[in-house]
Amino acid sequence: MTAWRRVPGKPAYEYSTSAGEVRRWSVRGEDAEPVTMLEWVPIVTRYIVVKDSKGKIIEARYTLTIADHEDTIDADDLGSAESWKRWPGAVGVHDKPMREVLAIIVQDQAQRRAQTVAAPYWSGDNLVMPGPDLLERGYGEKFSVAEEVAELLRIAERNPKLALIMGFSYGAPYVEPLDRQPFWVHSSGVSSKGKTTGLLAAASLHGRPGKRGINRPWNASGNGVTLFLGKLAIMPAFLDELHMAGFTPPQLKRTVHTTCDGSDRFTSSRKRKLSESPAWYGVLFSTGNYSVTGVCPHAEIAVRVVEIPTPITLTPEDAKRAKKLAIENYGWWTPVPREAMRLALAHAEDLIGIPEDGGTAGRVVENLALGVAGAYFLGGKELADAALSAARELLAVQVEELREEGVKPSERLLEEIRQAVVSRPNKFPTAGRYSDWVRDHHANHGLAIEGFADGDRVQILTRSMARIATDAGLDNYRIALRELRDGGLLKVGSEKGERLRKKIGLAGQKFDVYEVVLSSESEKTTGNTGNTGNHEGISAGHSGAETVPGLWPVPGPTGNREPEPGNHTAASAEATPQVADAPSPVPGSRFPVPGSRSGKLDVPAPCAAGDGLSSWHRDGIPLHANCDPPAVVPVQEEIPPADPPRSTRAQRAEPRADRGEQLARFARAIEQSGRFPGAAERDVSAALTVFSASLDGLAWGPSAGTTGQWLFEKLEAQYGNVPVLGTPPNQPDLGEGLVTRFDFVDQAADVGAAEWVASWDVNGQFLGPLGGLELGTGEPEHVDGGMFLARYDRKALKLPGYARLTEDLDVWPGCTVPGGQWVPNPVAEYLLMRYGAVEFAERWVWPEHRRWLALWGSRVTAARTALMARDDLPSRMALVALKQMYAKFLGGWLNSGPSKNNYNRTNTLRPDWMHATHAQARMNAFRALGKTDPQPFCVSTDTAYFLLPAGADVTALDVGLQVSGQVGKWKRAELAHAGETGTIKRNNRTRESTIAAEVSKGRASGVVALVHDLHARREERAGVR
């Protein structure tokens, strides 16, 4: 029975998502009939919100499905007719009252769904990531090989600045939860010195690097940058070539301040309503040929920008290799508990040498400490020592630069006044000389002066102070004047010091001046030999750039190491670390841990971060932290209250297997493929590592189908918001009448008139439809059939289930489904759209449904794409194994009942899922084949065969199919001469035949075997094989 829901606030209207209709009651009464207003209903599949720093919703978006088209619309656009036009089936929206009804329908559905936060955020020790489509380009994408990541970290150990940059990248997501100030990491200097390499290496931790991935050019306005950062929330940003932004020094200074103070902006609407843009708290990685701290040599910039001058890498070989490794291995960042990072930051600050009085240098040290602590969790003690070396060197340089420029506004203004007097002496005459000039020329004009200088005292005209302050980089020089007054270097015009300016009389004139003393009494006594005095807030800390052994006495990835003797004066904590006797494996580890070699980790530290960092003492106070790395939660979207998410404790354990057992099973799978005869054990082992890394550490099971099941269970364990899949339901009683195969041969095809037979395959045919395929949940229901019309009843066939035909219908000429047979609903829908009206005798339907395999398919597709981009032997072998896994899981495991060997005893024993997946994939293929010219004469599984005339250009064949490497698209497969005789091998028997003979007998399998054989012979003749 169709459920209707009244539209809140519009009692005359009601809607039904199952019926796909909006109707209106005009007259009430027993005989009243509703009037259908719309023959479609927007179905809300996701309620997306953006929140400010206080958790208040400041933006709302809705993902809607209308007539099989899915898109996302802003809440503010629900009332716009133009916004609804993006859905092809959304007709009848030009009437404003109707749009108001639609807006209420959308909001009514949304308020009954869980909110999906559109940006990453921390929940306890878990970093919660939104869906992949809500992340910015490249973020969250993953593919890495443990050995190659370990090599990248070893390169970073040899290049301290690279180690520090990667450490900053690891620590960036902790800026917000640890309440630290955002800052920039800017690599500056000439080209080809490692700036881009460092940016790529840093970006590779969080997703796919490069210009088509995370990395963006600095081609943006200041406001554009803040809006972009607001979408990242807490994730780091990576912007290349700062000069592209075209900032003037004031604009650059403003951009640094804005981005490092949360990036949120307050705006007012025409109705004077205040709104706040999303905030950002992280680290902005930047590169450029010029120096930010050089263009803006101010203390407030120095505490917000860590400037790393080139070279970043010390040798061209390291730069080239690190760049290649970073591009090919990405998304391998793994968190540690926030308390562990907080302790490591405090320890890193001690090692760098934070000054007791804090000040500017203290804030610089706080920023540098994030890179050192991040390097420790990333690669252990060796990488942390390299980063520490670079941090001390940068601190020493920055302290000296600040001393030269002056830290306080008063120091900078005073130095600029000195420079002005020295460089423009004619603009600062003595009072006596000016009086003589006026007396001699009998005029008080004609001499352009800026003030009067007399020894250490300078009287600056008030109108000239603005220019001098601007040269000093001061927007407001009154702050500097007050500091000079408080230090006794500004002679004020009143006893209480309220007036900073003075009035003087000279040569019969009155002047407003600021009277400044250029040197203090202490400078006169000791001699002014430069800025060698003790400036407040400045401490060089450790100026040495060398790596001192044992400077990181904190247990962790490299085990418990006692401090070694060395020239080490940092106020480091007294450490009495405790190391667990038998550290347990880290949950969700993405890398196998092969151990250490020569005291160095061969794998990234995150996979072993929990092995020893249990506690250490600081200032004699034991601080404890639970240091099991929490799993990153990639999807935030929750299940509505009717089907609540499970708690973390309710998740099943991730499937695991012994490495030796895995290798033996994996080797059998590779051998059975027949693609790599005589493969070396070393290559097979490397391929297993690559396969496992491509799927976040998935183990290879007893069979390819079992491995697919393990991936399903792994994702079920990893994502707490995925509802528990219950026990398999009772399958509908379809008898022997289910049609699932749709191979055919057109026996009327004129093979003799053709010269060539060409075939096209579907890429990952069964993977293609998984993203949008609804699969049944719970028990199915038996419903009556009837006449279905394409215009009105198509949505009913979108539900998972089966339908029984009443008459013979052609899926394709030569491919007929007999009347009385059952077909999965994707086939029933295809037939309905093909004929316009179809009568069904009866139907089975799952009212409850979900895209159960969408996440599984997404992960497998991502792994397939990553492996196809690599041409090394282990990756090619891993790709073959991956294809076996998804083909077996989707092609047999779901239907492998007790009557089969190695049958499926799990909750994924769902023949209905397999039937729906296969049927949807096949019907998608038929829809594409319906647009080709010529039409195929044979279709078998995922391959279509075409007859091509004599003279056809076989080097550039195009029959109208969309050729692409994406799943669900097509690729050109085989080419054979139509008239040749070939060999068909089957059941240890061979026979000679021709394509024309197999077509005349209607044998699709014979056509497939012959084309394959003739294609192989043609390649052999051409020397391809």
Image (spheres, rainbow, N blue to C red):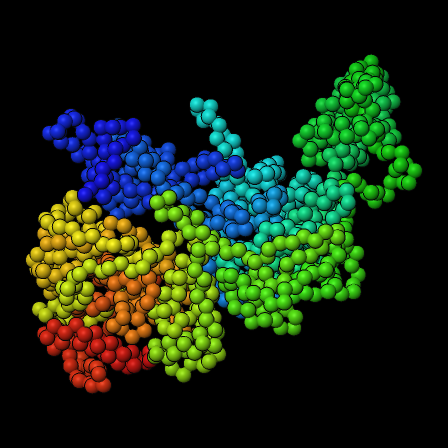
Residue 664 locus on image (x, y percent): 43, 78
Judged left or right of residue 49, residue 797 is: left
The residue closer to the viewer here, 579 or 146, is 579
Q: Position of residue 958 (x, y in %)?
A: 24, 62
**Residue 78 visible in the picture:** yes
Where residue 956 appears, as percent x and y from the top left, is: 27, 65
What residue sits 72% from the left and 27% below the top? 478
Q: Is residue 22 left or right of residue 492?
A: left
Q: Nearer the viewer, residue 474 or 85?
A: 85
Numbered disc total: 0
The residue sitting at 15% across, 60% down in the picture is 822
Residue at the extreme right of the image, as rendered: 525
Q: Quadrant of residue 252?
A: top right
Q: Nearer the viewer, residue 84 or 917?
A: 917
Location of the C terminus (image quadrant): bottom left
163 relative to 539, above or below: below
315 w.r.t. 571: above or below: below
Vertical placement of residue 790 versus 591, above or below: above
Percent from the top left, x then y, of residue 248? 59, 38
